[in-house]
Image (cartoon, rainbow, N blue to C red):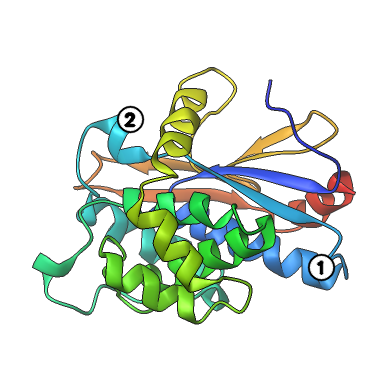
C-alpha cells in the first residue's frame, strides 16, 4: 500500500510517457479549476520505464502514442520530435533524478520542474537527458533554486530515491505509468483512459476505447 499524506496526490510515472504527460496536465488543470492551488500538492515518484523494460526510450512507440494522446487534450502541449533523431533522449533517468532532487527544496518546486520537463520533451523537442537542458528548463521555474538543484544533481543525491521508487514500482501496488494514489487509500491507473494496443509496440498503434476527463475533478475532491 502506498502511504499518501492528506492534501497530496502521489503520481508514479515516467517523464517520457505521453499518457503521464496527459495525466499531469489534467491534474494541474483540474486543481486550478477547483481553486485548490496551494492546498493540494503533487508528489511525483519515478516509474522509470527504461529500467523495467530494459530498453532505451522507444521513439516509435512514443510517436504512435503522441498522435493519439495529443488528440485527446491538445492544450497539454505536443509536437512530433523536431530535432535530429540522434538528439532524441535515450534516457529519462537524469530528468527523473532532477525532479526528486528538487524535493529537497519543496514538493511545489518538484512538481513545477516535473511539469516543465514534460513540456520541454513533448512540446519543445528538447533533449532532457542532458544536464544543461535540465538546468535551462529549471531556470524557467520560479519555485526552483537552480544553484541548489545543480549541486544536488552533481552530487547524485537523488539517484537512490529514484531506485527506491523503482523498487516500489515492482510491487503489485503500482500498475504502470501513470498511476495516481490518494489519501483515502484509493488509486487510479491512467485515469479516465480505457485503451488497448493494435499490433506490436513500435509497429502498431494505441486505440482509446473511452476517455473520461471528469475523473480528475473526482481525484482532486478525494485528495482534500
Relative horizontal placement of residue 164, taking residue 54 as reference (left or right): right
- Against 31, residue 6 (above or below) is above
Asked if residue 70 can be seen in this view, the reply is no
Q: How far from the left and from the top, in percent, is residue 169?
A: 49, 27
Per the image, label 2 sits on a secondary structure element best described as helix
Relative horizontal placement of residue 84, taking residue 161 as reference (left or right): left
Q: How far from the left and from the top, in percent, is residue 21?
A: 50, 60
Residue at point 59% right, 53% down? 104
Q: How far from the left and from the top, in percent, is residue 7?
A: 85, 48
- Against 169, residue 69 (above or below) is below
Residue 123, quarter of picture: bottom left
CA–CA distance in space, label 1 to label 2: 33 Å
- Against 79, residue 200 (above or below) is above
**Dot 2 corresponds to which residue?**
52
Relative horizontal placement of residue 178, taking residue 37 as reference (left or right): left
Q: Which mark is residue 37?
A: 1
Q: Which mark is residue 105?
A: none
Q: Residues within 10 Å of mark 2 (few under 14, many from 20)?
A: few
Residue at point 84% right, 46% down? 223
- Against 143, residue 105 (above or below) is above
Residue at point 49% right, 43% down? 195
Mark 1 or mark 2, earlier in chain: 1
Amino acid at each position: 500500500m502506498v502511504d499518501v499524506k492528506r492534501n497530496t496526490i502521489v503520481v508514479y510515472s515516467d517523464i517520457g510517457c505521453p499518457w503521464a504527460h496527459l495525466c499531469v496536465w489534467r491534474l494541474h488543470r483540474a486543481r486550478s479549476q477547483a481553486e485548490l492551488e496551494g492546498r493540494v500538492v503533487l508528489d511525483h515518484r519515478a516509474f522509470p520505464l527504461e529500467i523495467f523494460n530494459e530498453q532505451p526510450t522507444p521513439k516509435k512507440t512514443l510517436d504512435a502514442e503522441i498522435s493519439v494522446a495529443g488528440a485527446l487534450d491538445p492544450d497539454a502541449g505536443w509536437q512530433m520530435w523536431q530535432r535530429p533523431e540522434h538528439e532524441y533522449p535515450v534516457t529519462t533517468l537524469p530528468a527523473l533524478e532532477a525532479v526528486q532532487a528538487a524535493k529537497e527544496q519543496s514538493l511545489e518546486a518538484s512538481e513545477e520542474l516535473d511539469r516543465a520537463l514534460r513540456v520541454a520533451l513533448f512540446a519543445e523537442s528538447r533533449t532532457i537527458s542532458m544536464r544543461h537542458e535540465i538546468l535551462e528548463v529549471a531556470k524557467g521555474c520560479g519555485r526552483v533554486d537552480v544553484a541548489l538543484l545543480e549541486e544536488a544533481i552533481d552530487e547524485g543525491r537523488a539517484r537512490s530515491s529514484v531506485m527506491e521508487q523503482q523498487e516500489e514500482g515492482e510491487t503489485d501496488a503500482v500498475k504502470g505509468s501513470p498511476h495516481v494514489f490518494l489519501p483515502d487509500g484509493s488509486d487510479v491507473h491512467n485515469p479516465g483512459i480505457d485503451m488497448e494496443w493494435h499490433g506490436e509496440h513500435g509497429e502498431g498503434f494505441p486505440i482509446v476505447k473511452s476517455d473520461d476527463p471528469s475523473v480528475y475533478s473526482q481525484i482532486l475532491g478525494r485528495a482534500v
